[in-house]
Amino acid sequence: MEVIFLGTGTSQGVPMIACDCAVCTSPDPRNRRTRASIHVVMDGLHVQVDAPPEFRLQCLRENIRALDIFILTHGHADHITGMDDLRRFCDLLGGRALTVHTTEEGMSRVLAMYPYAMSELPIAKGYAAFKLVGMPTVLDLPQGTIQSTLLPHGGINTLGLVFAERSSGKKFVYYTDCKRVPREAVEFARGADAVCLDGLRPLPHPSHMSISEACEVAREIGAEQTWLTHLTHLTDHGADEAALPAGVKFAYDGLRLVL
């Protein structure tokens, strides 16, 4: 299994507009964060999770050339507004609609934003077409399984995802955009080879875990490696990572995990 972190930033991105703080002006490339998304390859199956505003640029930067399944964790702007750029993958699928797995909230947001894409085939060559499907508790595929669990995120729930590759037995957990990780989700994550958690900033936030809250969840899950994502400009990658517990690190754009 390969996990590619296309983006690891918050809704404002880093650098932020009109900000001259030490992180936004840092020469460290790990402090340049596009909005959060990942691309997971399980035995040749390409799964994209979320499509932020920079999705096209992320795909070009990381040479993403195939996409079989798209999962939208929730309908907030920093996760959905790049979906129009999925049109290229509809072309690569032979002009068929791309299956979009998401929540009821996610489906309503896609319907509102992309009414022209709600068809089995694109309305014209080069357009996007989406087939909306509710994300099941377990998506069972020849290449492995993708288990989902609901995570509280302000007034909505987001999809937490557990990827398990059949051939290797490797397991990866992606819990972004959440205020806490319920007990059931902690149990789903046990035994993972790598975990990614929402760790927005050092300060508390009403709908995201802080870095200390994420570190506590990492301790509960007990994975050998945990990566924090959805980071703001309040986190300096180089200086602040040294203070994290053993086994916990900050993710960065372009990070690739081979499990």
Image: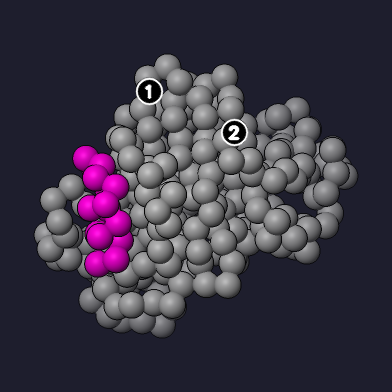
48 above or below 107?
Answer: above
Q: Is residue 79 left or right of residue 95?
A: left
**Where does the magenta region start and end?**
212-226
Instruction: Looking at the picture, tell me which residue is in the foreground, 90 or 155.
Output: 155
Instruction: Looking at the picture, tell me which residue is in the foreground, 205 or 76.
Output: 205
Look at label 2 and name its amino acid.
Leu
Q: In the rendering, which numbered label is found on residue 169?
A: 1
Q: Is residue 32 visible?
A: no
Residue 186 percent across, percent down from the top left: 37, 49
Residue 164 percent across, percent down from the top left: 44, 30
Q: Disc 2 designates what residue?
A: 139
Q: Residue at x 75, y 28 (%)?
A: 94
Q: Residue at x 52, y 22 (%)?
A: 143
* Element marked by disc 2: strand
* The N terminus: image quadrant: top left
> From this viewpoint, which residue is outermost toward the top?
167
